[in-house]
Image: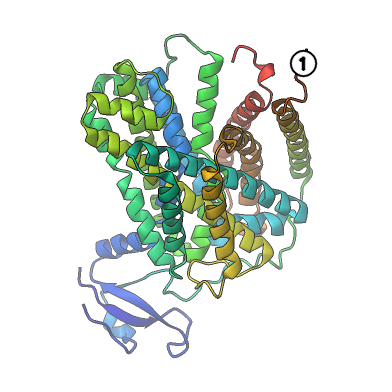
């Protein structure tokens, strides 16, 4: 195994394969997500998200009730 | 394989400006193997870390109560967990960004912050359960948790703050491979092969039929195998490792191998629980199960199970803490990479450190409400999972974002089926824990 300090001529690599670790490679161009902005929502996507919000509210209320229950707020006295 | 380091120009980049370091091999086979080994990591880690302390407890309890009867459910979860994480692979490679950033950018501030707060909360509570398991196992090993727990926490911080993604990954992959000891444990406990094959391949109910307790356990098995933090972790990990489009097939293989290992290890945990049941022990927790197994096998197995419990908790902790730190960094716009030294990404490392330190510290407080925390984890995971996978599915259908890497129709059929089943199970679990009076028989 040898370490080369100068770039190897690519011509020398005929019939050879160069494997580069992703962290050693030049960063690849990806989708420019910042300029895409928010997703365009179809009616079905919007309905999905509203349903999800309703589900989350319901679950949170249930959790809140359980916490109060555990805290003994609904315990019968006497 | 004739390997040597070379400096070769990346396509379209001037050599003088950005040289890249590579290795030269002569055969296509060696090229594929080496490429896979370089890409390998995030898929294995996310899957094996999923078998965390909670999973050890759930799977061993399933084996201790129902023997090999629930093995088929675990096997059924192999394609489920693979398909979900495969979507994460495509999303991570195509965008080069984490899951939290994607939700924030594509669904807006409200959903972005909601996902972040929910993730951070459920992650923190899960971390407390990981350290509770470490505390329990150390106790049984005769180590004072007041010394052992801070040492483990310090080790967890040290492996992450080296400023080298590769160093962290190699350490964690080594810990993942230690998990293979579960195979030896299960094998040496002399399980009945016929029962294992039958239990794995023929779906059926355990004697006693479908009781609320069984339903609860099944939901817990599903919940522990597919966890919300996994989506965030693997996508951020792929982004941090800078995987390329050409790496997709290898990242899929990495994920598939990880899924196979985690599912078979889960089966081995069930077999350990089954061995204690066969010898007449009643399951209380995995540490006690290890002590019970020690009474009818060598002390090596007792210690091995306790150490595997600690290993599972350590893997879970590093992955979960990192998913928190990455997500927080993505939303806040802070530098967030394991490749960066501490001084260049202080916020990222502080979130990691605080997550680990606070969870470890909480466990050491006498009479900390651990039961309440475990309950909270189950409920919040139930709340989080459906929303996380719905966002994932919507993002994977976002052609503007993913182009050719977006879901195909067959992907959608498979994924929506998985999502609906997970949604129902999560709802049942969360409702059963949050409002047990709705299920009086439980």
Relative to A22, A15 lies left or right: left
Q: Crowding at label 1, few (<14), some or many (≥20) Cα neighbours within 10 Å?
A: few
Residue B260 visible within the image: no
Quadrant position of the N terminus of chain B in the picture: bottom left
Relative to B165, B4 lies left or right: left
Residue B250 visible within the image: yes
How many numbered marks are there? 1
Quadrant position of the C terminus of chain B in the picture: top right
Relative to B53, B193 lies left or right: left
User: What residue sits 49% from the left and 66% below the top?
Assistant: B338
Relative to the observer, which residue lies in front, B320 or B27? Answer: B320
Identify the residue at the far top of this view. Answer: B208
User: What residue sits 31% from the left and 49% below the top?
Assistant: B177
Horizontal and vertical percent for residue B45? 42, 51
Secondary structure category for the residue under label 1: loop
Q: Is residue B38 above or below residue B340?
A: above
User: What residue sits 48% from the left and 83% below the top?
Assistant: B13
User: What residue sits 41% from the left and 50% below the top?
Assistant: B147
Relative to the observer, which residue lies in front, B11 or B44? Answer: B44
Residue B3 position by quadrant = bottom left
Relative to the observer, which residue lies in front, B28 or B180? Answer: B180
Q: Would you name the residue on which mark 1 appears? A: A76
Q: Is residue B382 above or below residue B113?
A: above
Horizontal and vertical percent for residue A72? 73, 25
Q: Is residue B327 above or below residue A60?
A: below
Horizontal and vertical percent for residue B287? 38, 32
Horizontal and vertical percent for residue B204? 42, 16
> What chain does badge 1 belong to?
A
Relative to the observer, which residue lies in front, B146 or B401? Answer: B146
| Colour scheme employed for the rendering of this structure | rainbow
């Amino acid at each position: 195994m040898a370490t080369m300090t100068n770039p190897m001529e690519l011509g020398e690599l005929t019939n050879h394969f160069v494997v580069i670790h992703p962290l050693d490679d030049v960063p690849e161009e990806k989708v420019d997500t910042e300029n895409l902005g928010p997703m365009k929502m179809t009616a079905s996507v919007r309905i999905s998200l509203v349903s999800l919000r309703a589900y989350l509210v319901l679950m949170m209320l249930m959790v809140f009730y359980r916490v109060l229950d555990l805290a003994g707020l609904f315990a019968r006295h006497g | 394989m004739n390997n040597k380091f070379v400096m070769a120009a990346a396509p379209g980049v001037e050599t003088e400006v950005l040289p890249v370091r590579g290795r030269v091999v002569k055969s296509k086979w060696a090229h594929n193997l080496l490429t896979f080994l370089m890409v390998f990591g995030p898929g294995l880690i996310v899957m094996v870390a999923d078998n965390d302390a909670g999973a050890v407890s759930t799977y061993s309890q399933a084996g201790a109560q129902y023997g090999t009867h629930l093995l088929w459910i675990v096997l059924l979860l192999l394609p489920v967990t693979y398909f979900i994480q495969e979507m994460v692979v495509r999303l991570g490679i195509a965008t080069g960004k984490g899951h939290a950033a994607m939700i924030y950018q594509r669904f807006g501030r409200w959903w972005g912050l909601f996902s972040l707060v929910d993730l951070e909360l459920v992650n923190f509570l899960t971390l407390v359960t990981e350290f509770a398991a470490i505390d329990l196992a150390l106790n049984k090993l005769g180590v004072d948790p007041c010394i052992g727990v801070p040492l483990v926490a310090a080790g967890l911080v040290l492996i992450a703050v080296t400023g080298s993604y590769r160093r962290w990954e190699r350490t964690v992959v080594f810990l993942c491979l230690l998990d293979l000891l579960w195979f030896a444990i299960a094998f040496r406990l002399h399980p009945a092969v016929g029962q294992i094959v039958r239990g794995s391949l023929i779906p059926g109910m355990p004697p006693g039929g479908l009781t609320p307790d069984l339903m609860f356990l099944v939901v817990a098995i599903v919940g522990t195998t597919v966890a919300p933090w996994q989506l965030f972790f693997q996508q951020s990990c792929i982004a941090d490792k800078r995987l390329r489009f050409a790496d997709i097939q290898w990242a899929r293989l990495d994920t598939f191998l990880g899924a196979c290992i985690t599912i078979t290890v889960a089966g081995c945990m069930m077999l350990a629980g089954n061995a204690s049941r066969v010898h007449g022990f009643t399951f209380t927790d995995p540490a006690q199960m290890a002590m019970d197994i020690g009474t009818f096998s060598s002390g090596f197995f007792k210690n091995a199970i306790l150490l595997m419990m600690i290993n599972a908790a350590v893997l879970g902790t590093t992955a979960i803490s990192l998913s928190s730190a990455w997500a927080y960094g993505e939303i806040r716009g802070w530098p967030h990479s394991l490749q960066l030294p501490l001084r260049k990404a202080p916020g990222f490392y502080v979130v990691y450190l605080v997550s680990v330190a606070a969870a470890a510290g909480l466990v050491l407080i006498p009479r900390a409400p651990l039961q309440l925390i475990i309950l909270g984890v189950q409920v919040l995971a139930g709340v989080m999972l459906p929303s996380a996978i719905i966002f994932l599915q919507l993002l994977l259908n976002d052609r503007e974002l993913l182009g050719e890497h977006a879901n195909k129709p067959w992907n959608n059929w498979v994924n929506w089926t998985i999502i609906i089943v997970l949604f129902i199970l999560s709802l049942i679990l969360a409702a059963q824990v949050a409002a047990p009076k709705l299920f009086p028989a439980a």
